[in-house]
Amino acid sequence: MYRRIKGTKDILPTESYQWQYLEKFISESLERYNYQEIRTPVFEVTELFARSIGTDTDVVSKEMYTFFDKSKTSLTLKPELTAPVVRAYVQNHLEQISPVTKLYYIDSSFRQERPQKGRLRQFHQFGFEIIGTEYPEADAEIIQTVYEIYLRLGIKELNVKLNSIGSRDSRKNYLDILKSSLKPYYNDFCLTCQQRFHKNILRLFDCKAEPCQNILDEFAPSILEYLTKGDQDHFEEVKNLLDLTEVPYSVDKKLVRGLDYYTRTTFEITNPLLGSQDAICGGGRYDYLIEDLGGKHTPAVGVASGMERLLMILRETDAIPEKKTNLLYFAALGDEARKAGFKVIAKLRRLGITTEMDFLRRSLKAQMREAGKKAANWVLILGENEIKLSVVTLKDMSDGSQRQISLENAAEEVANYIE
């Protein structure tokens, strides 16, 4: 027997409506903010991710699904979704349509990491980007928008963590100071952090080991103390705009995010229902990524949110409405009734009525039992007696009442009656 691949999940009909509900809610919410949907291929050339995310990150060095196609080109299943959006933006010259572009997506990503609660090897995210402006209004809108989406979904206890990791000018000086401040404690870091110390020292802040975090808490200087005047002003204005829109936040000087392309604003939103891995979303500004990937210098900011983790919270809090159906079940007995019923069903569906019928030619009792299992609101019965009288019997399953309707105009009359 074949089984699904480790780290993947079947989304069965019992829960697929929850995904549909959430996807529709997100799409309608973002289109209200005038974001437009973009869809990118499931795989890209590997170099796109190595260049954008950074070769020293765990994502690129350990977690990507990479393979060669028949032309010996190295391809990778998308491990994240911003770089493909940026590639599409550059390749399709979207800057020619408008100086500021607002895009959103709901898509799958793939990382070969250890599966755990809310973290799979094939996972789903929604995200959105504002491309083409360096100003803090865009940062604040991104944060305020995703925060409002969570509030409208009924999620409480949202913690917005905010930081600035500055521009490249700010970071160059800071990284030298950070390295000299932590060098005396190099041997006290875990092996992974010792490697990060040489390759990308900012990644030390991603470590979850308590001893490493204790060293950082005590001896690592805050990057906020080394921001340029322009970076400081940008960060202050982001905070002021969040205050104006009543988005509560706390400044977390260790929040650097795990991808190399971030600059200036970084943020996460967490929820305690997720346990120790409590982030629902993360994002920030990436002012150099488009230029690094072959486009013109184009500042941008965005966010990505895990769908599985979001659904975990919604299920935990019973925030997803019950699936509502208005199902009509057609119970037919005999060959003539089945043929006549098939015609009526086709008309009902054209009129927008959700209709189901029996495919096993069972008894009326068995068909009524099946209608109950499917939570049908109505049953349309067509048997030998109804055929003789040229009528169908419509049964209301909520109270058991019945009425007879002309077979000739059954679809139109039923549709008018039950809507």
Image (cartoon, rainbow, N blue to C red):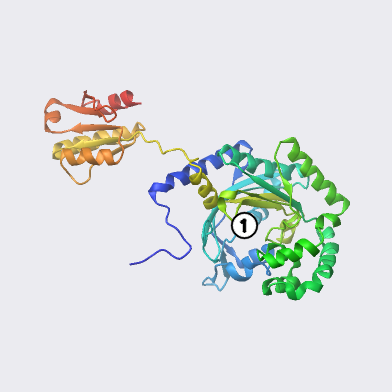
Residue visible at 61% across and 67% down in the picture: 46
| In-front residue for pair 313/299 | 313
For the N terminus, the quadrant is bottom left
Instruction: Classify residue 11 as left or right of residue 262.
Output: left
Instruction: Classify residue 275 as left or right of residue 191.
Output: left
User: Where does residue 269 sit, x and y in percent of width and height?
Assistant: 65, 48
Instruction: Classify residue 166 as left or right of residue 337.
Output: right
Instruction: Classify residue 107 as left or right of residue 262.
Output: left
User: Where does residue 419 sit, x and y in percent of width and height?
Assistant: 36, 26
Badge 1 marks a residue whose secondary structure is helix
| In-front residue for pair 409/60 | 60
Residue 146 higher or lower than 53, as above or below? above
Q: Is residue 150 visible?
A: yes
Residue under pointer 1:
84
Q: Is residue 203 visible?
A: no
User: Where does residue 375 sit, x and y in percent of width and height?
Assistant: 31, 38
Residue 9 higher or lower than 26, as above or below? below
Residue 298 higher or lower than 157, as above or below? below
Residue 331 higher or lower than 122, as above or below? above
